[in-house]
Image (spheres, rainbow, N blue to C red):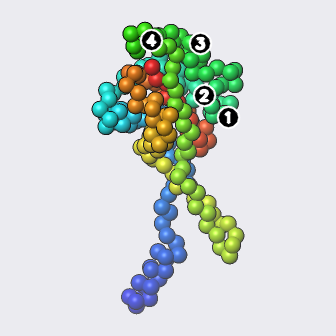
Amino acid sequence: MNKIPLMALLWLMAFYCPAKAYADKAPRIDPIQLERQIHQQINRERQRYGLAPLVQDEKLTVIARNHSQDMARFNFFSHINPQGEGPAERGKRQGWDKKKQTGPNTWKTGLSENIFLNSLYNRIVITTRNGIAVGREYIWKSQEELAQTTVQGWMDSPSHRQNILSPLIDRQGIGVAISGNDVYVTEDMF
């Protein structure tokens, strides 16, 4: 066989039948590992601003995880759950009764909270031929990208950023729940 037609055939196959760049299925995400990665990313942000890292508190983690699971299960996205409870009420119901002195005559009770709704994919690429959709391809986020985009989303929001960079907090819990392609993230802080 002549080398030129063979090379042309190989070039055409590569051009018209490219290897699939992205998997058809979402990557497997470990919610507990993602919680740890978000915690670490938040502490990197705090350290960039000269603040002490936050301790990962197991009780706060359970409270945050329960809220993320509720949002995923009942398909809502809010600090207030369907029972009308905010972070302080949910924390108290789950046994969080701590208080700390933040000034000579000032005490903090309750919880501060950030929530974020992320997605397992960056975008969807639709393939068309003659104006008709013939294929759909998801461009999936890695677990590291999910952690980075969650924390960056909070840092880009003034009120969430203020919570993360507050010198008055010293502990946090991160809770993640995944439903379909949605990633619900709750950060409860004290």
First of labels 4, 1 by sequence position:
1
Q: Which amino acid type corresponds to the residue marked 3 in the rendered image?
A: Arg
First of labels 1, 3 by sequence position:
1
Q: Residue at x 50, y 57 (%)?
A: 22
* Disc number lying in front (2 or 3): 2
Q: Residue at x 40, y 15 (%)?
A: 102
* Disc number lying in front (4 or 3): 4
Q: CA distance from mark 1 to mark 3?
A: 22 Å
Q: Residue at x 66, y 66 (%)?
A: 134
First of labels 2, 3 by sequence position:
2
Q: Is residue 138 above or below residue 78?
A: below
Q: Which amino acid type corresponds to the residue marked 1 in the rendered image?
A: Asn
Q: Which amino acid type corresponds to the residue marked 4 in the rendered image?
A: Thr
Q: Residue at x 56, y 45 (%)?
A: 119
- Residue 185 visible (yes or no): no
First of labels 4, 3 by sequence position:
3
Mark 4 — residue?
106
SS assignment at label 4:
strand
* Disc number lying in front (4 or 1): 4
Q: CA distance from mark 4 to mark 1?
A: 37 Å
Please tell me the numbered disc located at residue 79. Answer: 2
Mark 3 — residue?
93
* Residues packed near mark 4 inside 10 Å, few (<14), some (14 to 19) or many (20 plus): few
* Residues packed near mark 1 inside 10 Å, few (<14), some (14 to 19) or many (20 plus): few
* Quarter of the image where the C terminus is located: top left
* Disc number lying in front (4 or 2): 4
Q: Could you say which quadrant of the image residue 136 lies in?
A: bottom right
SS assignment at label 1:
loop
Query: Horizontal placement of 129 versus 171: left or right?
Result: right
Q: Is residue 152 above or below residue 15?
A: above
Q: CA distance from mark 4 to mark 2?
A: 25 Å
Mark 1 — residue?
75
